């Protein structure tokens, strides 16, 4: 049995992906690039397609204890294998959370939370394979489930708004940090990103598509110099 795998899904290898792969390799973390065709329904982000593809990947990589599912061209990694393994729950899924309630901005005031990271981000999530499968089955049996919905639309609109207990988001950013609408709480200590509000050191940094990363890298490098 192997310990940890990062599955990175993309239609083409671009953006930050080359750097991301080097970072994972340096941390001795196995990764797999899951290429899918642009015509595949999975590229539309429907929750039904996502669950179907996840099942296939879990069957392919059933020899791993813990798995991280990741976006490809807008993610970077600053951590260790042991850190990631310790932050992935043994009994449930953990999903990235963000400040931006996409695609249903009108839900902003209806979804409660104890930190600004109270909405689902579909680009990063992780768990133990058996619990990921149980979680998928529980969602598919839920009264709010509709396979054609965009994944974040399903989680935010159908579940989080009604406070159903099927959305285990990383609201303190212990494992994942989404940069969209970043509010100034992110700092750096010797090249390591730190969420000063929650006192966490999230190893996976998600730039959410068009979020600039140049200033992030400049500040990170300056922190190495003391």
Image (tube, rainbow, N blue to C red):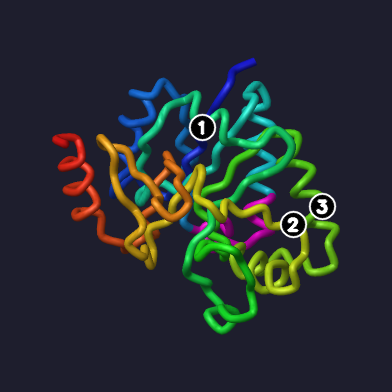
Magenta stretch: residue 50 in it? yes
Of residues 12 and 131, which is closer to you in this image?
Answer: 131
Quick one: label 2, few (<14), some, or many (20+) residues within 10 Å? some
User: Which residue is nearer to you in this view: 204 or 32?
Assistant: 204
Q: Measured along the vertical axis of the image, is residue 69 above or below residue 179?
A: above
Task: Compute the Cα span from label 1 to label 2.
Answer: 22 Å
Q: Residues within 10 Å of mark 1 (few under 14, many from 20)?
A: many
Q: Nearer the viewer, mark 1 or mark 3?
A: 1
Q: Residue at x 68, y 68 (%)?
A: 160
Residue beneath disc 1: 84
Which one is in front in this view, the residue at disc 3 or the one at disc 2? 2
Which residue is identified by label 3? 138
Say which residue label 2 marks: 166
What's drawn in magenta, residue-wise? 39-51
**Residue 66 image point, x, y percent:** 62, 30
Give the percent coordinates (x, y) of residue 109: 59, 81
Res. 194 image quadrant: top left
Q: Position of residue 121 (x, y in %)?
A: 53, 59
Report helix, strand or loop for mark 1.
Answer: helix
Label 3, secondary structure: give it: helix
Query: Which element is circle 2 on?
Result: loop
> Quick check: marks 1 and 3 in contact, CB under 8 Å?
no
Mark 3 or mark 2: whose residue is earlier in sequence: 3
């Amino acid at each position: 049995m192997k310990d940890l795998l990062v599955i990175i899904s993309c239609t083409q290898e671009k953006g930050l992906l080359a750097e991301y792969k080097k970072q994972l390799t340096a941390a001795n973390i196995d990764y797999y690039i899951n290429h899918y065709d642009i015509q595949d329904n999975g590229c539309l982000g429907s929750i039904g397609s996502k669950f179907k593809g996840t099942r296939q990947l879990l069957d392919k990589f059933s020899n791993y204890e813990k798995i991280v599912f990741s976006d490809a061209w807008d993610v970077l990694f600053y951590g260790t294998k042991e850190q990631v393994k310790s932050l992935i729950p043994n009994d449930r899924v953990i999903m990235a959370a963000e400040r931006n309630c996409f695609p249903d901005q009108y839900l902003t005031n209806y979804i409660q939370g104890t930190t600004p990271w109270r909405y689902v981000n579909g680009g990063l999530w992780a768990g133990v394979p058996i619990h990921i499968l149980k979680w998928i089955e529980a969602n598919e049996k839920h009264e709010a489930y509709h396979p054609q919905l965009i994944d974040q639309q399903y989680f935010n609109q159908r579940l989080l708004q009604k406070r159903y207990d099927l959305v285990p988001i990383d609201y303190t950013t212990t494992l994942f940090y989404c940069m969209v609408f970043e509010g100034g709480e992110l700092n750096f200590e010797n090249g390591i990103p730190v969420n000063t509000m929650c006192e966490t050191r999230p190893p996976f940094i998600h730039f959410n598509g068009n979020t600039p990363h140049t200033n992030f890298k400049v500040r990170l490098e300056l922190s190495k110099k003391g």
